[in-house]
Image (cartoon, grey):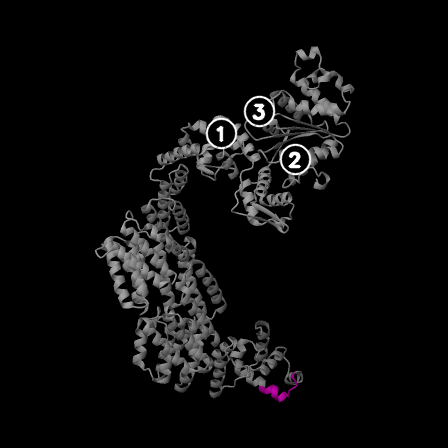
């Protein structure tokens, strides 16, 4: 029904199917086919609203409409709904004088005062006679127009009324009357009757289910007078959560949110104000109270105890807390489920939940704080009895009840225990959330040792998740922990964790301060169990400035940790040792990371195992260029919430994309990683991100962008080790792409100087690879030098190895080993992970190969020229063309946009030759082609001969067939 036709009714939302069924049933009644419909639903589901819809539709259609309701305030009055319905009829229509009703006047005396006499008042009519009298009355009322008898709240009515309803439902089919009854699906005679009539097809049960999200959306828009698209998602989320699709609850909650200021309606829409609290509306509290009261005192007590336990609750704990017998417990639960207050939770038979959070809050509001605390204590005792030691989620579950019982310190201890368990199991998100909650509670406590313990656990979680910014905000709490009751070992451990967070943030001076504070707290005579972590973190801090001293300190930390039984500290020490060893090459670093991994596996340390897996994956990438293990590692880190580990992997993947000339993906990852680093406060990744930017700029010949990045690295002393990498991997390559080998050598010398002053974190500064190739080409490096570099661990890294192999090929060619030299270059081309480096190397090696008569320098130069042109690098492309011309190769003029497909360009086909080839696909003769291209037949003949040679075809016919295949298979760029 359109809302505008009945402005007194609120818009009916989400009940289109039910409304259509009622309209059809009314139409059938007007045609003389009666029926019975039971509208079944919990409180607030819209039974009365649909009844109003039906009565309005009936009146508008000219039907006789009779409406009665069973009273719920006092004890049920016999035949009340029927009396109320018929009273309206006899107030408006003189229908009693109808001839067919005269035999039933005495039977109707209980319903109609005008028919009551002294004789009939003394004895009640037989139920069947009364029911037949009502049926005849309805038949007369609906003659020629149909009749609607609507009886509401049938669950509260008396047995006599139910007997009449049953008789009517069984005999109304051909009477032109629709019997519409509403009731709740709760245990009782009314629900039993409805189910029985449904089974024997004498009635239709129409269940009203909760509204879906879309229907709640439309309901909110209707009640607020807004277009649906103006309702923001947070408002809809909250409304769906708190109302669980109950139309009455949704409407009342909207009104309360608006009245309290939680929901602000504006001209353009509405918005939530989170800091404003919304009380449960009185209408909702009254409704929940009524529903609970209907379950009896024991049922109400059970519900309030369940509300104390939580929105979700285990019935085993509930029964033990109330000391209730199993049969009684299950009986009350069944009644609450039937009343729509509770529902079984998933497939676990022990867990139940309130249908709506609003119900639980309203029930809690009926209890005094003392009552809540008493029930919470009973529940805590029950959980401890049922689950000794509080395994799994029971620890966190009991912490909330302990806090509700007023034992804040006990709640903090339980939350800290739950957080540590999550941390040990590698569940970082859960650990961080739980420990943060424990810390907020602990701050209100005067127990300094307890606060120190909780802060230590929280900092451990923040270090592992990489949330450096969030962790360092807690530095201000250190002063409160300087208390005689706090053990020095615990306070020193807190300082060490702050030092680790400072290193993650790139604040090395702050890290040094925290390490000094830890040593001061421990004093000179501290046990090695206490100093092992200090030494491990100090080694990580010293690494960039004093690598040898840092390596010794890390080795001592590992020994102390292993003797003291501290596997986590030992893993940290092996990590530091591996990172330091990586500067020299892969072998020792690989061994350290493998030891770290074995230690983590042996002691079941999933977070350290993940770190070891990432470091081993990075070693594999450095050696082979394979990123599969890195991709698997980042997926594991994403699942566990290890943000720092995932961020580190993403930065290295960006580096890999840059070296592979996949600049768009590299820049995307750099942008996302920079944003993530800013959010978490991970300043230690900034130099590596700058290196990736330098590679992206340098390998594309973008000198201005590269110089800006290099200047930023030079200005920051902490970035100097990465400046060596940027000059060796980016600036030297950029200089070669500018055809300036002198500048390239100067860049490599600068990288070597930086590396000598503060060693780079990776041996990729150039002198282990590209510098060797340039030295061999210039005659400054011989076989001895080449073998030294190639045999060193750094020479086996994938980036360096391609240049080492090219240098080896040049030396092999010089001493006449042509086949070995060619095979070496072929191996480099086959493993072409770094296209810029490979094509640049081939362009550098080709003149030497031609001079010493080995390899295929023409093919290399053509491939390099093609690549550089496509990459927008004109200087090396021109150099390749110049070398080809010096080798006697005809090099076609390259237009800005070539129509010649790449495979044909690679074999030297010119633009004019390609035009001839296109026409030959149609088997045209020389004269026809000449006419088409405005050239002479003699010129066409020369082009055809050239094409036969370049394409290696046998004759003109074969060339025509080849031209047809090219036309069908190859698309010009």
Q: Is residue 77 above or below residue 537?
A: above
- Numbered badge on residue 185: none
Of the residues tagged 3 and 2, which is closer to the observer?
2
> What residue is pinned by disc 2?
50
The disc, 2 or 1, on the residue closer to the chain's N-terminal end is 2
Q: Which residue is mark 3?
A: 189
Q: Quadrant of residue 388?
A: top left
Q: Position of residue 691 (x, y in %)?
A: 42, 70
Earlier-in-chain disc, 1 versus 3? 3
Q: Tell me the element at label 3.
A: helix
Q: Point out the frontmost of discs 1 and 3.
A: 1
Quadrant where the C terminus lies?
bottom right
Position of 871 with respect to 8 (left or right) is left
Percent x, y of residue 810: 37, 81
Q: Using residue 718 as the reference point, say whether residue 869 is left or right of it.
A: right
Real-space Cα distance between discs 1 and 3?
Answer: 22 Å
Quarter occupied by the N terminus: top right
Camera-side residue of 156 and 595: 156
Main secondary-structure element of the magenta-colored stretch: helix
Q: Which residues are magenta?
A: 933-942
């Amino acid at each position: 029904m359109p809302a505008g036709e009945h402005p007194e009714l609120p818009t009916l939302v989400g009940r289109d199917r039910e409304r259509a069924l009622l309209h059809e049933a009314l139409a059938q009644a007007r045609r003389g086919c009666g029926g019975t419909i039971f509208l079944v639903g919990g409180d607030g589901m819209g039974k009365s609203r649909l009844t109003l819809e039906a009565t309005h539709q009936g009146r508008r259609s000219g039907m006789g409409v009779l409406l009665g309701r069973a009273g719920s305030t006092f004890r049920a009055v016999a035949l009340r709904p029927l009396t109320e319905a018929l009273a309206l009829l006899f107030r408006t229509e003189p229908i009693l004088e109808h001839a067919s009703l005269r035999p039933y006047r005495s039977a109707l005396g209980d319903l109609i005062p005008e028919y009551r006499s002294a004789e009939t008042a003394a004895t009640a009519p037989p139920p069947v006679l009364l029911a037949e009298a009502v049926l005849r009355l309805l038949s007369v009322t609906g003659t020629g127009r149909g009749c609607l008898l609507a009886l509401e709240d049938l669950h509260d009515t008396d047995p006599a009324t139910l007997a009449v309803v049953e008789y009517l439902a069984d005999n109304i089919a051909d009477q032109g009357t629709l019997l519409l009854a509403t009731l709740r699906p709760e245990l009782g005679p009314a629900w039993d009757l409805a189910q029985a009539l449904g089974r024997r097809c004498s009635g239709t049960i129409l269940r009203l289910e909760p509204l879906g999200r879309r229907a709640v959306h439309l309901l909110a828009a209707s009640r607020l007078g807004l277009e649906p698209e103006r309702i923001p998602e947070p408002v809809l989320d909250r409304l769906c959560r708190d109302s669980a699709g109950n139309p009455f609850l949704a409407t009342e909650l909207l009104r309360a949110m608006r009245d309290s200021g939680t929901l602000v309606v504006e001209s353009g829409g509405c918005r939530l104000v989170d800091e404003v609290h919304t009380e449960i509306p009185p209408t909702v509290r009254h409704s929940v109270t009524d529903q609970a009261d209907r379950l009896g005192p024991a049922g109400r007590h059970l519900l309030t105890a369940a509300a104390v336990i939580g929105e979700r609750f285990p019935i085993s704990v509930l029964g033990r807390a109330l000391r209730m017998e199993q049969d009684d417990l299950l009986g009350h639960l069944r009644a609450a489920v039937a009343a729509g207050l509770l529902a079984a939770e998933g497939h676990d038979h022990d867990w139940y939940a309130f249908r709506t959070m609003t119900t639980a809050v309203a029930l809690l509001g009926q209890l005094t704080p003392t009552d809540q605390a008493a029930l919470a204590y009973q529940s805590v005792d029950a959980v401890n009895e049922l689950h000794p030691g509080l395994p799994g989620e029971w620890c966190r579950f009991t912490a909330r009840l302990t806090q509700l019982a007023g034992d804040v310190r006990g709640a903090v201890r339980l939350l800290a225990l739950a957080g540590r368990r999550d941390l040990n199991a590698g569940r970082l998100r859960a650990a961080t959330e739980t420990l943060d909650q424990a810390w907020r509670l602990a701050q209100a406590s005067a127990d300094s040792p307890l606060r120190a313990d909780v802060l230590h656990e929280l900092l451990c979680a923040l270090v592992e998740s990489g949330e450096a910014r969030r962790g360092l905000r807690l530095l201000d709490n250190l002063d409160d922990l300087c208390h005689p009751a706090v053990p020095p070992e615990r306070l020193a451990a807190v300082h060490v964790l702050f030092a680790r967070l400072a290193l993650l943030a790139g604040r090395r001076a702050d890290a040094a301060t925290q390490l000094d504070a830890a040593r001061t707290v421990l004093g000179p005579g501290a046990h090695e169990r206490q100093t092992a972590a200090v030494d491990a973190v100090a080694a990580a801090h010293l690494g960039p400035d004093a690598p040898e001293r840092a390596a010794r300190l890390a080795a001592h930390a590992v020994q102390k940790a292993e003797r003291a039984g501290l596997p986590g500290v030992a893993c940290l020490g092996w990590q530091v040792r591996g990172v330091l060893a990586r500067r020299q090459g892969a072998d020792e670093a690989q061994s350290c990371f493998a030891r770290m991994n074995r230690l983590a596996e042996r002691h079941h340390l999933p977070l350290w195992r993940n770190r070891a897996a990432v470091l081993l994956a990075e070693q594999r990438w450095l050696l082979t260029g394979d990123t599969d293990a890195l991709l698997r590692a980042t997926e594991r880190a994403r699942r566990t919430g290890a943000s720092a580990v995932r961020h580190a992997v993403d930065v290295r993947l960006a580096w890999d994309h840059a070296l592979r000339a996949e600049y768009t993906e590299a820049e995307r990852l750099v942008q996302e990683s920079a944003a993530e680093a800013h959010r978490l406060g991970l300043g230690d990744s900034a130099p590596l991100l700058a290196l990736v930017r330098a590679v992206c700029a340098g390998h594309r010949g973008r000198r201005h962008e590269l110089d800006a990045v290099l200047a930023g690295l030079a200005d920051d002393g902490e970035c100097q080790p990465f400046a060596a990498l940027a000059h060796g991997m980016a600036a030297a390559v950029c200089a070669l792409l500018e055809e300036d080998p002198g500048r390239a050598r100067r860049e490599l010398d600068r990288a070597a100087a930086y590396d000598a002053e503060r060693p780079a974190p990776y041996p990729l500064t150039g002198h282990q690879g590209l510098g060797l190739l340039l030295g061999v080409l210039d005659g400054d490096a011989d076989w001895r030098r080449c073998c030294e570099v190639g045999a060193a661990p750094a020479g086996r890294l994938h980036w360096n190895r391609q240049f080492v192999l090219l240098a080896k090929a040049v030396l092999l060619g010089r001493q006449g080993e042509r086949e070995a030299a060619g095979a070496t270059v072929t191996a480099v081309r086959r493993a072409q992970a770094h296209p810029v480096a490979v094509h640049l190397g081939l362009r550098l090696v080709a003149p030497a190969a031609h001079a010493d008569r080995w390899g295929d320098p023409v093919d290399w130069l053509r491939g390099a020229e093609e690549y550089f042109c496509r990459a927008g690098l004109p200087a090396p492309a021109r150099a390749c063309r110049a070398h080809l011309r010096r080798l006697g190769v005809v090099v076609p003029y390259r237009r800005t946009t070539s129509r010649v497909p790449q495979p044909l360009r690679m074999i030297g086909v010119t633009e004019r030759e390609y035009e001839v080839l296109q026409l030959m696909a149609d088997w045209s003769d020389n004269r026809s082609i000449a006419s088409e291209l405005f050239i002479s037949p003699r010129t066409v003949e020369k082009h055809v001969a050239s094409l036969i040679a370049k394409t290696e075809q046998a004759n003109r016919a074969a060339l025509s067939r080849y031209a047809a295949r090219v036309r069908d298979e190859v698309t010009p760029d």
